[in-house]
Image (cartoon, grey):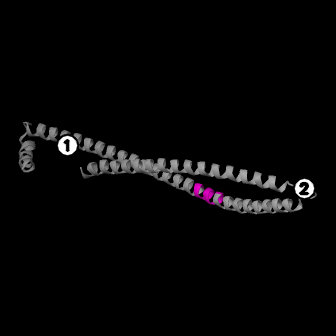
Amino acid sequence: MAKQDAAPVAGTAAQDRIAALTAETRRQAQELADLASLLDRAEARCAALEHDLAAAREIPEETGTAQAPEEYRRALSSLRRRVAELNAESDGQAQDLARLARLVFDKEEALKRRNAAAHEAGQAAAAARRDLLAAQEAEAACARRLAEAEARIEALLHSSSWRITAPLRGLARLWKR
């Protein structure tokens, strides 16, 4: 009987564990989607920065030197500063992308581990249920055998043979105490 009581408790604990793991998996999946969105935005920003950098590099140095050399030098200096800033920003974005990619990878691995744990918890719940059913079947078989034995004893007690009934009546009195 104790095994019967323990099996539903184990099944309930496993179901609670499965529910908790499922909720955690959903939360992790949402977090993973948010990180993927953030990664996409960062990649788009990097592409825009690379485009700006490529456009800045395409300006030839000879443009406008005859017309306004000082203005050209200031513009060129400004462009070079902007190119340096874009390079630094691009490097920072690349590092951010690498960190985000690692974070996404770690989250995916954690999600896989949680899914595996949920699967194992489900397997444990199924095993507990099978054990409970086996214990119930064994209990029913024992109850049937006991009923059959009691029926045989009753039949023997009501038998007309004194050699059979005398010792059995003594046993029956002892047994019913």
Q: Which residue is mark 1?
A: 146
Left or right side of 54 for 115: left
Question: Who's the residue at 63% across and 56% down the image?
Answer: 101
**Sequence-first tag of 1 and 2:** 2
Q: Quadrant of residue 105?
A: bottom right
Q: Position of residue 173 (x, y in %)?
A: 5, 48
Can residue 127 be seen here?
no
Left or right side of 131 for 81: right
Amino acid, disc 1 = Leu
Q: Nearer the viewer, residue 9 or 146?
A: 9
Q: Residues within 10 Å of mark 1 (few under 14, many from 20)?
A: few
Question: Who's the residue at 18% across and 42% down the image?
Answer: 149
> What secondary structure do most residues of the magenta stretch adopt?
helix
* Residue mark closest to the camera, 1 vs 2: 2
Amino acid, disc 2 = Gly
Left or right side of 146 for 89: right
Q: Which residue is mark 2?
A: 64
Query: What whole-number distance in Å separates the C-alpha atoms at marks 1 and 2?
Result: 111 Å
Q: How many marks?
A: 2
Question: Who's the residue at 57% across and 57% down the image?
Answer: 106
Q: Position of residue 28 (x, y in %)?
A: 50, 51
Residue 100 belongs to the span the image colors magenta: yes
Q: In this picture, which residue range is highlighted in magenta?
A: 97-104
Q: Residues within 10 Å of mark 2 (few under 14, many from 20)?
A: few
Q: Position of residue 63 (x, y in %)?
A: 90, 55
Residue 145 belongs to the span the image colors magenta: no
Q: Nearer the viewer, residue 92 or 158?
A: 92
| Secondary structure of the residue carrying numbered label 2 | loop
Q: Position of residue 94 (x, y in %)?
A: 68, 59
